[in-house]
Image: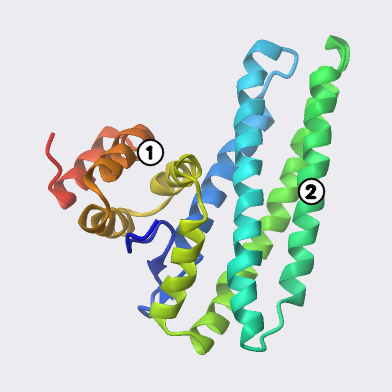
Amino acid sequence: MSHEFSLTSIPDLNGRYDIYGAIHKGLRKAGCDLLGRLATADFHNAEEAVFLIGDLRNYLMLAASHVSHEDDHIHVALAAKGVSTVTLDEQHDDHRTAFRELEELIVAWEKAWPLHKAACGRKLYLAFAAYIADDFAHMHEEETVTGPLLWRNFTDNEILGIEMDIIASLPPEKSMAFMRIMIPAINPAERAALLGAMKKDAPPEIFQAVIDFAVRPGLSAIDFAQLADALKLVA
């Protein structure tokens, strides 16, 4: 994808290009929503819980992709500047272990006898809660430590270039999936800036698909009306 709009970045309070901002907001909100659903789920009701399990697997797929994108693009760029990413790499290895363990717990719930499904569901909920706690601490470190390292070693245009490489590596369906979790998680000004850049630079059919399948379904009527007014969208 060669169009120069960003799917993940928003300026930080100092006006610098924040490669972590929107995607981390999206992962935090989606993760918290899932954690709440896991806490209240009736795991005896397999017909109902299967939709939750599907959403959990989708979230873990996006989280694993995000980790790989950071490894392959952000960490590689930092290493080329002589900046160590050993701590972040170790944390990402811990994430990959957590992804495998969570999938094993999902399969255990799927295979469990009805009498044991609630216990398996509770184990899954607790393991996901532990993962979310670790991931939130990790994302905080990236935004408060790694982000400033990027700003010291790269210009905003260079950081944008790193992000464009990430975006170019994504198949369209995965780009749309990331947009679905990010748009509801960012504030109105960030939403308008991100989608305004997309409206300006993306092909009209791609922009309209994002509005129809990623933006409109995830926003309240009031929030969508505010965005439509800011972007001068045709009803």
Amino acid on which the number 2 mark rests in the picture: Ala
Q: Is residue 13 above or below residue 114?
A: below
Q: Quadrant of residue 128?
A: top right
Task: Determine the residue positioned at 66% across, 19% down.
Answer: 50
- In the picture, the disc for residue 98 is 2
Task: Determine the residue positioned at 42% across, 72% down.
Answer: 160
Q: Residues within 10 Å of mark 2 (few under 14, many from 20)?
A: some
Amino acid on which the number 1 mark rests in the picture: Ala
Q: Quadrant of residue 218?
A: top left
Give 45 or 211, whichever is nearer the viewer. 211
Q: Is residue 160 above or below residue 222?
A: below
Task: Give the Cα separation between the discs numbered 1 and 2.
Answer: 28 Å
Q: In this view, does 27 lie to the left or right of 123?
A: left
Task: Determine the residue positioned at 81% across, 23% down.
Answer: 109
- In the picture, the disc for residue 214 is 1
Estimate the x, y position of residue 39 in percent, counting from the top left. Answer: 68, 31
Residue sticking out furthest to the front:
2
- Element type at marker 1? helix
Q: In this view, does 48 lie to the left or right of 160?
A: right
Q: Is residue 41 above or below residue 127?
A: above
